[in-house]
Amino acid sequence: MECVVVAGGHPAPDDPLYAYSHGKPKAMIDMEGQTMLEYVVHALLVATQVQEVIVVGIEPDLTTELTFPQPVSFLPDQGTLFQNARSGMDWYLAHRPEDRLIMFATADIPLIQGAHVDDFIIRCRPLDQFAYYPLVRQDQMEQQFPNSGRTFVQLKGSTFTNGNITLIDTRLLKTGSVWGEEITNARKHPWKLVRLLGFTFLLKYLLRQLTVADVEQKVSQITGTPVKSLFVNHAELAMDADNPHQVELMRRQLARQQA
């Protein structure tokens, strides 16, 4: 399977992460001797289920600072997370037109390992849906990463956070540009995501009556394609770096792993 790593995004001077990025993309923040991006790409390249990786959002002058175990392709930043994902998909459609499912990953999850990626992809088999999305339960997230600072969604019967990798059918991206942009922009705010599904869903969410199955069914109806979410056992897939606290948390974790 091919993978697009979305690595754009430059913290502005008033962003707390600017002190870590020093004007470079967030993906270039140092994490115990390597950038976040290097950790992520290394994990993807050692995964047995991933064949090729393309990184979107790193300018050519910065690529010389990066080291990977095998060649990686780069595309420039397109301005938004969704447009970077589209750019990566378009590249694969031009170079690998036979591909149907493409994996997308953000560049700020440096704790992932190849085994985590393989397990998620294998659990998605027989790969007959148009999108697969990992979820991590709150108790598991907090057990592995106490005080993680992650945003949790509380639905009927489950409280969880979203993972930062996903499998998407290229046909869904071709037909869902507007919807995809809206979902991407609202991804950090659960109530905004639910509001996109309509007033009835927002009301059910506020009353704690909305289920994961309800959301899957509604999204499938809107896109005209079947989608599936999976609860996974690897909290690392959801542990991203949105603020200094999370960067320091992951730096400590990586230091322990390397000790």
Image: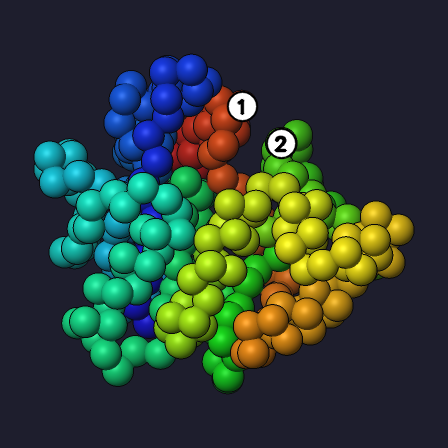
What residue sits right under mark 1 in the picture? 245
| Residue 199 image position (x, y, % from top left) | 77, 56
x 43%, y 71%: residue? 175
Considering the numbered disc 2 on the image, is that residue within a helix, a strand or a loop? loop
Neighbourhood count class around disc 1 (C-alpha, 10 Å): few under 14, some 14–19, many 20 upward: some
Q: How is the image coloured?
A: rainbow
The mark nearer the N terminus, 1 or 2, is 2
**Compared with residue 170, is residue 177 higher up or lower down, i.e. above or below?**
above
Q: Is residue 165 left or right of residue 65?
A: right
Cβ–Cβ below 8 Å for labels 1 and 2?
yes
Q: Quadrant of residue 88?
A: bottom left
Considering the numbered disc 1 on the image, is that residue within a helix, a strand or a loop? helix
Task: Look at label 2 and name its amino acid.
Answer: Gly
x 47%, y 59%: residue? 178
Task: Look at label 1 and name its amino acid.
Answer: His
| Residue 22 image position (x, y, % from top left) | 29, 19
**Compared with residue 163, is residue 128 higher up or lower down, i.e. above or below?**
below
Q: CA distance from mark 1 to mark 2?
A: 8 Å
Q: Is residue 208 left or right of residue 197?
A: right
| Residue 66 image position (x, y, % from top left) | 18, 39
Q: Quadrant of residue 96?
A: bottom left
| Residue 253 image position (x, y, % from top left) | 48, 33
Neighbourhood count class around disc 2 (C-alpha, 10 Å): few under 14, some 14–19, many 20 upward: some
Q: How many numbered circles are shown?
A: 2
What residue sits right under mark 2 in the picture? 149
Question: Residue 165: in sight, yes or no?
Answer: yes
x 20%, y 45%: residue? 76
Q: Considering the image in quadrants, where does the N terminus appear?
A: bottom left
